[in-house]
Image (cartoon, coloured by chain):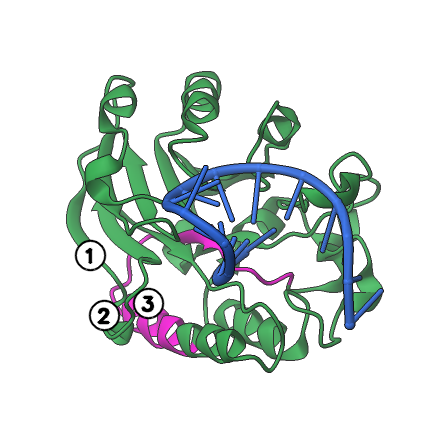
Chain colours: A green, B blue
Amino acid sequence: MKIATWNINSVKARLPHLVEWLQSSAPDVVLLQETKCLEEAFPFEPLEDLGYNISVYGQKTYNGVAILSKYPLEDVTKGMPSFSEDPQARYIEAVTNQVRVASVYVPNGQEVGSEKFAYKMAFYEALFKHSQTLLTLDEAIVLGGDYNVAPFPEDMHNPTLSGTDRILCSVQEQNQLRRLFNSGYQDGLRLTHPIHLEKSHSLFTWWDYRAGSFDQNKGYRIDHLLLSPQAADRTLDADVDTTPRGWQRPSDHTPVLVKLS
DNA sequence: ATGGTAGCAAAGCTA
């Protein structure tokens, strides 16, 4: 069972890439972020034609998350129960083929100490609370998404930023994401790509559009797949697919995948 | 501190 997460930066602008990638990679489940449209504007048909069932939690212009699955989507939840006051569409959860999956779009935070940063921290507090409730279910769970945090120095092209006050790299943000890892969720990619085995091959998932970041591989690993123990036990493989980032008019993020037995 | 790019939507905001 192949499960992917991908921030596509507008499902309408990226529909050709999404279709191309679904056909070439044939994932069973895809967790999308930044769909950037209302549910009624979501391009259901071309994706359903490829055999996917779809659940969408959208809003106009910003954010928006969705789940595509070759299996039926059951028990769909839109918005985090622990953050019900959130007006932004950043979380959707469902059960599919007996795996509980969620598509998570953590706020960017803009700048450490800003109002948007406080919102990011509040989102992480709510996510931690909800993630702990989910652990008590003793299920295979995959929480995939754009976490907007590079958790360790190895996850940045410039590791001197780690633990500074730079957005995506700050101590506060790293502590929030590491807390999820330390509470029982495994970092899916690191199960098959432990840091001590990484050499020249980087596992970045996001490169800024500006200043030729991708060509120089000046990226960050900020998209993650968090696995419950029951999901981690079934992990056969995990990887980043950098191919779509090299296409014409790409998303600034690229897909991350896990394969479960 | 600024500017570099992209998407949405129609000027500026978000990233």
User: Could you tell me if the residues under marks 1 and 2 are in contact, i.e. CB atoms within 8 Å?
Assistant: yes
For the residues marked 3 and 2, what is the alpha-carbon distance in whole angstroms? Answer: 15 Å
Which residue bears the numbered disc 2?
A81
Within the image, what quadrant is residue A155 found in? bottom right
Would you say residue A98 is visible in this rendering?
Answer: no
Q: On the picture, is A260 further left or further right than A248?
A: left
Q: Position of residue A174 (x, y in %)?
A: 62, 72
For the residues marked 3 and 1, what is the alpha-carbon distance in whole angstroms? Answer: 16 Å
Q: On the picture, is A76 further left or further right than A115?
A: left
Tag 2 secondary structure: helix
Residue at image coords 39%, 53%: A63
- Quadrant where the N terminus of chain A sits is top left
Which chain's residue wears label 3? A
Q: Nearer the viewer, residue A211 or A150?
A: A211
Amino acid type of disc 1?
Thr
Residue at image coords 83%, 44%: A199
Tag 1 secondary structure: strand
Q: Which residues are magenta?
A: A125-150
Amino acid type of disc 3?
Leu
Which residue bears the numbered disc 3?
A135
Within the image, what quadrant is residue A67 found in? top left
Which residue bears the numbered disc 1?
A77
Q: On the picture, is A257 further left or further right than A143?
A: right
> 10 Å neighbourhood of mark 2: few (<14), some, or many (≥20)?
some
Q: Earlier in the sequence, mark 3 or mark 1?
A: 1
Q: Nearer the viewer, mark 3 or mark 2?
A: 2
Q: Position of residue A186 (x, y in %)?
A: 51, 59
